[in-house]
Amino acid sequence: MQTDRRAAALMIGASAALALAPWPRQSSAAAPVPLASEPWAVSHHKERPVRGGILRVAAPLYIGSMNPNRWPVHDWFTMGLIHDRLFLNDGSYLPSAHWLAESMVQETATAVLLTLRPGVRFHDGSPMTAVGVKRQIDWIRDPDSGTWSAFMLRPLESVEAIGPLQLRFTFKEPWASFAGVMASVPGFVLPEAALGSDNDRFNAHPIGSGPYIVEEANPGNFLKLKRNPDWWLAKAVGRPDMPYFDGVHIAVIPDPGVRLANFRAGKLDVMQLAKSQYPLMMGDRRANVYVEPLPITTMLRFNSARGACADIRVRKAIGHAIDRKALLASTQHGLGRIASGLFPGDHWAHDPALAPMRYDPALARELLAQAGHGNGLTITGYMHNSPPSQTLAGAIRAMLRNVGVTWQVDLLAPTAMSARYEQGGFDLAYNPSSWIYDPDIQATGGYQPGGIGARFRTLDPDLVAMIDAARTEMRFAQRQALYHAIEGKIVEDHLNVYLWWEESATAMQKYVRGFDPAMEIAHGEAWTYSHSLWFEHGRPGKPG
Amino acid sequence: MGSLLIARAAQAAAVLCIVVLLAFAGIHLVPGDALLAAIGETGYEADSRSLEAVRQAYGMHGPVTTQFWHWLSHFVQGDWGRSIGTGQRVTEMFQQRLPVTLELFAGATFWAFGIGVPVGTISALRQGSRLDRLLSAAAMVGVSVPTFWAGILMIYVFAVWLQWLPPSGYTPFGTDPSLNLQSMLMPTFILGIHSAGLLARYVRSSLLDNMRQDYVRTARSKGLSEREVIARHAIKPSLLPIVTVVGLSWGHMLAGAFFVEVIFALPGLGRMGLEAVFAKDFPVIQALLVVVSLNVLVMNFLVDAAYALLDPRVRLVA
């Protein structure tokens, strides 16, 4: 089963999406690599897996739509149990793992030949075909379908089925993120039944090709999945007993404290911990607690287009006034890594040469004095009104006050925050966190004219040009170098205050076996989805 | 009496219309775009065409007046729209969640009456005794203890330490009656205990008041036993204020259900409402406001009717 730290984190971060990702390194490899010999697919388990038992997990929200292209989806982890994608991301967030796509060949700068895996069947027994995938892609792009993911396929000119399992994708211009998109929302391969206009019917009887089949859906309460005995991957990697659990029950439990009570009472086998629960559980001998990095950068954004923060000295001063180490310890319970840039530290697009900004209140005061604010400065802003965010806002406000900056920060609900952002009513504000897979989505959306996140940011023409170049750069090394330069430029311009890269903590009962933190970090979701967990004795035991 | 009820019904209808208008205006006066905020939270930056497609699907396009007309015309025909938060039809959500909340209310009412009336009665009959003081204090605790705190405490005591009851979740009665009762025991108790405390205090003061009335003194002077005096002449009129308390408790229970259903992970209307408010899920909030207002108005109407039936003085005044 795929419920490990990453998976549970995905479940909790249900709003987090499986984002676009870049061109895989082996993109031009014509000959398909046998799955069982892929580094992420190899099994290193010392114990022999045991079949049986129902895994019990919890989510704060019900999955929502079972068609990923229909709004809303709250639980991408469960989505990945029902449906499989064409590609998956590795440990550095590259879509390098060929999943339902057996091979991909770059024919020209704007054409790709994709071959699907043979023998893949949906839960109703119907086969996956090139014609079916073409129909799905066309359906997503059709404005009448009302899909929310159509914009992701904008660079696509056409798709043709040129054989039973072969498709040719033609782009309007070179499209480096193609494989990333196919590792994302449009890449979940769906059966014909999902492509109609009646999503209610599909939600009641969803069909996918993933390791689990929907057995019972009770919106708002629970979702019961049962084992798919004909899962294609199990045969392909030579572990036919996968997935090892008989089923997965996902209970909807909104309150994190109650989730923990369920875990301690032995009613849950795996749970994602709230940050405040981590100190309570990390020394608990009755459970295994794992911490893993998440591809999320928590940061504040400046309004560099107007007001006091239009002056780079003020932005730099504010950056130096914030003690990230103290914030991490006091407000995040130690969960997080101090950030040095826009892209997470383990992301292929991150430049490892970048260093975190130094905490230096004296320098901050000096910079403020140089900018003409030696006698103090008042700035405005907003933060999310959740309790952790309120605590964070209070701590940052105190640090800014220490250097003579009064931050008048309003605590707002997401809808009100979007309205304030639209009006530019802020100098320093909360920047909604998102999962970072493909760097283009952050770069284009946040730092190019017209990007929703680019408003009230001063954009250097060189930065805009670099982002354009990276989007169409098909050679991996060059593309990576471009993103390092882009990240460096954004950092140099002090457009944001980078706080930390997120980490998540997951608790597992001792009897849950098969999890390997090192492999999980090294190979990412490709390892996660190819290595099912199991129960020590084939059923849930007693909590340790 | 008929004219009284007609007047009350007309008042209720007028109030309902005002509530609907104010609710719609209130939701749309709150700044921000719920769909934009919701889709933005996914980390994707959907372009305007994708957003418009979703907006059309939810009937959230055009001026506010058009949206209101669109909503109202569909609402009265039984089409309550689709939830932004879940994507489900709102009517379907109500069908799924109403039985849970009704069961919660029924259980809470059972605890409220089962505890409140005996405690209030015993307290009044033993006025000034240690038992009276103890029960009065217990009633005060019941009224003042915060629902969420008591809920978490009970979960840890009865589910985590003693392992007598499931910590949370809901199993329909038809699926497993035993598990249903086990899972509803704590939430109904928590929700009912506030009303029980309130009821105990009302019953106590009302009974004490009635015990001092002339007709009770007359009954005693006729030579009736104390038990007969209390049972036949004191308790009956003392129960009249209970009708009021039940009406008031209904409103409190609705508010309490918001917390209780979140804490105990019950898929009821309260949790649905709370999630909808946080997501500015307009179709759900609007439908919930109409249903809740209707509910409270109907309860008030029934209380008025019950008063008129039970107390001849009300009929005479009317």
Image (cartoon, rainbow, N blue to C red):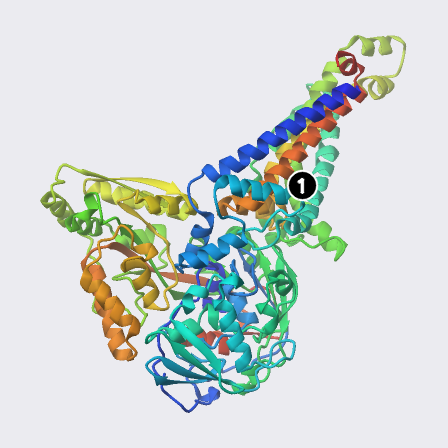
Q: What residue is shown at x 85% (from left), y 17% (from top)?
A: B229
Asked if A315 appears above or below A46 in the picture, the reply is above
Give whichever of A55, A215 is nearer the camera: A215
- x and y, in percent, of residue A291 in the image: 41, 65
Local secondary structure at mark 1: helix
Q: Quadrant of the N terminus of chain A?
A: bottom right
Mark 1, other Cα within 10 Å: few <14 / some 14–19 / many ≥20: some
Give whichever of B270, A395 is nearer the camera: B270
Q: Can residue B123 be seen at all in this image of the molecule?
A: no
For residue B5, side relative to residue B257 (left or right) = right
Instruction: Name which quarter of the figure residue B119 lies in.
Output: top right
Asked if B254 appears above or below B263 in the picture, the reply is above
- x and y, in percent, of residue A181 in the image: 41, 71
The single residue placed furthest to the right in the displayed view is: B223
Q: Can residue A444 be seen at all in this image of the molecule?
A: yes
Q: What residue is shown at x 31% (from left), y 41% (from top)?
A: A409
For residue B217, side relative to residue B257 (left or right) = right
For residue A454, side relative to residue A139 (left or right) = left
Q: Quadrant of the C terminus of chain A?
A: bottom right
- x and y, in percent, of residue A207 in the image: 61, 71
Give whichever of A400, B297 is nearer the camera: B297
- x and y, in percent, of residue A149 in the image: 46, 64
Tell me which amino acid carries mark 1. Phe
Instruction: Name which quarter of the figure residue A497 lies in.
Output: bottom left
Q: What residue is shown at x 80% (from left), y 18% (from top)?
A: B234
Asked if B84 appears above or below A530 in the picture, the reply is above
Q: Which residue is mark 1?
A: B189
